[in-house]
Image (cartoon, rainbow, N blue to C red):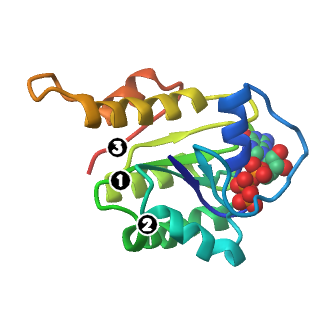
Amino acid sequence: VMLVGDSGVGKTCLLVRFKDGAFLAGTFISTVGIDFRIWDTAGQERFRSVTHAYYRDAHALLLLYDVTNKASFDSIQAWLTEIQEHAQDDVVLMLLGNKVDSAQERAVKREDAEKLAKDYGLPFMETSAKTGLNVDLAFTAIAKELKQRHTKAPSEPRFQLHDYIKREGRGASCCRP
Ligand SMILES: Nc1nc2c(ncn2[C@@H]2O[C@H](COP(=O)(O)OP(=O)(O)OP(=O)(O)O)[C@@H](O)[C@H]2O)c(=O)[nH]1
């Protein structure tokens, strides 16, 4: 599982929230390269070539933008192009709009992200590494999808990632084309 998105969108914080249930307020230590099993990549352009090398082996990608940073949302198209070029065709992909706790500073409308998600057929949720909103759910949904792909007997009903996050998510939304 690989976390991608512009620098500062909260990839490391999302992972720390999931892993340790904690949020380190005010700390921003930019990732250099790649961390452990869930690959927390660097959003900064200058580390992009390091990130490229990991796409090929990733089974799932969590693509993040920051709801308070319009530029990070505008980059999503470019990230999707990059994913298309470097990742496996059947990679599990989910779009996450992080920092939804900062309602006052919101710069990306949920509807705009929903439209983008719908256009690309991506499951989508808004998250907060600060409050934990939908964080466990994002990782659990990815885990369930990957588990089913590797173990599912053909007769079993297929796990539906979109339906799952729609049902379980708090204020979550998701879309199918
Ligand atoms: N309010 C709020 N701030 C957040 C949230 N997630 C992260 N931040 C803050 O955003 C800043 C950047 O977070 P990081 O997790 O380091 O960002 P990153 O995407 O890993 O950045 P790179 O490693 O450079 O790619 C930090 O100051 C965090 O405290 C969130 O959900 N809510």
Which residue does the numbered mark 1 point to in the structure image? 91
Q: In the image, is residue 152 above or below residue 78? A: above
Q: Earlier in the sequence, mark 3 or mark 2?
A: 2
In front of the other: 173 or 163: 163
User: In the rendering, at what x and y percent does residue 129 appear?
Assistant: 70, 36
Residue 104 in sight here: no
Q: Which mark is first along the chain, 1 or 3?
A: 1
- Dot 3 amino acid type: Cys
Q: Looking at the image, which residue is at 38% across and 29% down?
A: 144
What residue is rendered at 68% in x and 73% in y?
A: 47
Q: Which residue is mark 2?
A: 83
Which residue lies under the disc numbered 3? Answer: 175
Q: Nearer the viewer, residue 156 or 93?
A: 156
Q: Amino acid at mark 2?
A: Ile
Dot 3 and dot 2 residues touching (CB under 8 Å): no
The crowding category of the residue bearing disc 2, from other C-alpha atoms within 10 Å (few below 14, some 14 to 19, many at least 20), is: many
Dots 2 and 1: beta carbons under 8 Å?
yes
